[in-house]
Amino acid sequence: MNVGFLGPAGSFSHVASQTLFPDALHKPYSTIPDSIDAAKEGQINIAVVPLENTIEGSVNITLDYILHYQKLEIIKELTIPIDQHLMVHPDWSSSWQDKITTVFSHPHAVAQCHLFIRKNLPDAKVEHIDSTAAAAKYVSEHPDEPVAAIANKGAAGIYRLDVVQNRINDYQNNHTRFVALSEKTITTKRTIGRTCSQTGIKTTLVITLPEDHSGALHQVLSAFSWRRLNLTKIESRPMKTGLGNYFFIIDVEKELDDILLPGAIKEIEALGCGVSVLGSYPCYLQKT
Ligand SMILES: O=C(O)C(=O)C[C@]1(C(=O)O)C=C[C@@H](O)C=C1
């Protein structure tokens, strides 16, 4: 089985991909949409993509891409703790504080370390790049430049960089939720790495409201509430069809074939809403 991820090797997406599918072949892609396209076109069986971060919230590029362009099913979810580290080429290890002029990383990683950068490298320029691992690779390939990367420890090992500051994210309770996307439900040989525990089953629904129907969202929510269906997330994203038109993405803590959830969906459809199911899937948490 082939699993695609936002590369290069050593990204958090790579870690998530290896943890979710320990027996698979893992293939790096330069961007999240590239990995999703590859899964849709059958070049790979599954794409593992980031969906939500404790500090930065939703990964909009992932959400928008699966809502608007490539419909794939969510088949698994993995939440992993995120520790960011500042790393430099070994030639700059002893002088990084005075010499580093540019810090490279993924926009989410930069946002997670915003206070650290302000305090410790106030004059450095911040450059966004496709992933944390791409930042580490760039730094390793440009030993003459006074540049640093924010990435995970595995990337420092792969690209032979020195970690000069550990755990630099501003909030220590930093987690990212990844999902595995596939064209069809796939049964995998061994389920998941031993470092993880299953936390439950979720179903993700995309709901569109009828136009100019007062109280529609309230009625949608009450279909879940009187059935005591717990929602773990509700988020709106633009439908891109006009101002004020939104999709509501709702995560319900229940599997789809439970009688309660199909009942709630029928009730919501009867209100004139559109409902589609993005997936009903097991959720795992990687222990620290
Ligand atoms: O850059 C990476 O290593 C990624 O896998 C992307 C990503 C993200 O999109 O949020 C994943 C986890 C971290 O929150 C930082 C970056």
Image (spheres, helix red, strand yellow):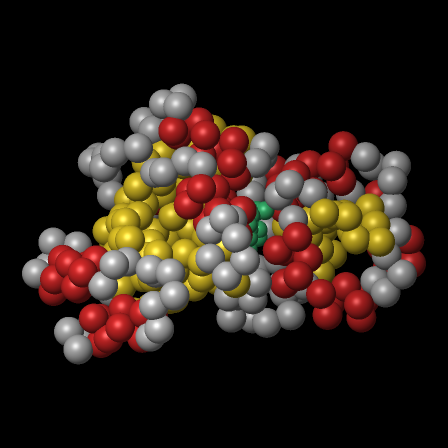
Q: Position of residue 219 (x, y in %)?
A: 26, 73
Specify the quadrant that holds the N terminus: top left
- Eyeballing the image, is 65 above or below 232? above
Residue 49: quarter of image: top left
Q: For residue 85, what is the image quadrant?
A: bottom right
> Most extreme residue toward the front, as rendered?
212
In depth, the one of 65 and 183 nearer the eye is 65
How many badges with numbers are in the image? 0
Q: Is residue 68 left or right of residue 98?
A: left
Identify which residue is drawn at 20% across, 71% down.
223
Q: Is residue 209 above or below residue 152?
A: below
State whether residue 74 appears in this view: yes
Q: Is residue 113 left or right of residue 281?
A: right
Q: Is residue 283 something that shows in the picture? A: no
Residue at x 33%, y 60% (from the top left corner): 210
Residue located 27% across and 53% down the image = 275
- Between 250 and 239, the residue placed more toward the observer is 239
**x and y percent of residue 105 in the render?**
69, 49
Q: Position of residue 267 (x, y in %)?
A: 16, 64
- Position of 213 with respect to 222 (left or right) is right
Q: Picture quarter containing residue 84?
A: bottom right
Residue 266: where, in percent of width, then height?
15, 59
Identity of the residue furthest to the left in this view: 259
Residue 286 versus residue 29: which sits nearer the camera?
29
The one nearer the camera, 144 or 36, is 36
Q: Quadrant of the C terminus?
A: bottom left
Which residue occupies 23% across, 37% down? 185
